[in-house]
Image: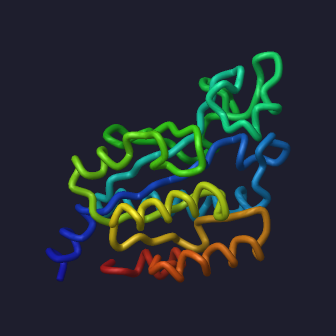
Amino acid sequence: MAVAAAGKWRETAMLVIDMQNDFILPGGPMHVAGGQAIVPEVIRAVSVARDRGIYVIWVVREHDPCGRDVELFRRHLYVNGKGPTMKDSKGAELVEGLVPLEGEYKLVKTRFSAFFDTHLNSLLQSSGIKSLVVVGVQTPNCIRQTVFDAVASNYQPVSVIVDATAAANSEVHTANIRDMQNIGVSTPTLQEWCSDYA
């Protein structure tokens, strides 16, 4: 049983999505209302992932100060060389308590999906990854689009830890979790996931 469990986790990666100051801290320009509440759960999920030997990938948004690489509908947020999650800004940093370790990977994206116009798929394939666990913000945007692309790319299983992900409110979060369940995504609580092959 222990050998089978170890093999399972060797082929699993955890995507920690957008746990950055501008998304998590109150008053941030992209603040997700439910984000700060899940920080302890994300910290614990990452800790368990490390203990299991799961490959941790830190997925972050970083943008050009002029907003030239951001979606057209957000370009108005970038004025005079300032805007959300600018590269090397305080707002683009991971929220306090989340610190990548040596050997973990930082993936920069400029769209909702971590797969869109990035090398995530080739990184996962070259690392022998077959299944994904997803935590972070926010459920209707970056979580959902990344998960749908993961399913379309035949990663199985794909799991979203339901209480280590968040949206602007619980209704939006729950509706999007239900949509992901409908395409075969597993949505355990953190406790359930931590107990799996513990």
Question: Quick one: quadrant of the N terminus?
Answer: bottom left
Question: Quick one: quadrant of the C terminus?
Answer: bottom left
Q: Residue at x 36, y 43 (%)?
A: 104
Instruction: Tell me if 165 is positioned left or right of 156 in this view.
Output: right
Find residue 20 and report its image quarter.
Answer: top right
Find residue 107 and report its image quarter.
Answer: top left
Residue situated furthest right in the rendering? 27
Q: Residue at x 27, y 58 (%)?
A: 129
- Percent position (x, y) of residue 30? 76, 45
Depth check, front residue: 77 or 19: 77
Instruction: Tell me if 4 is positioned left or right of 102 in this view.
Output: left
Residue situated furthest front in the rendering? 72
Residue situated furthest left in the rendering? 3
Find residue 122 and report its image quarter.
Answer: top left
Residue 106, above or below 42: above
Q: Residue at x 30, y 51 (%)?
A: 124
- Percent position (x, y) of residue 60? 55, 41
Q: Residue at x 85, y 43 (%)?
A: 27
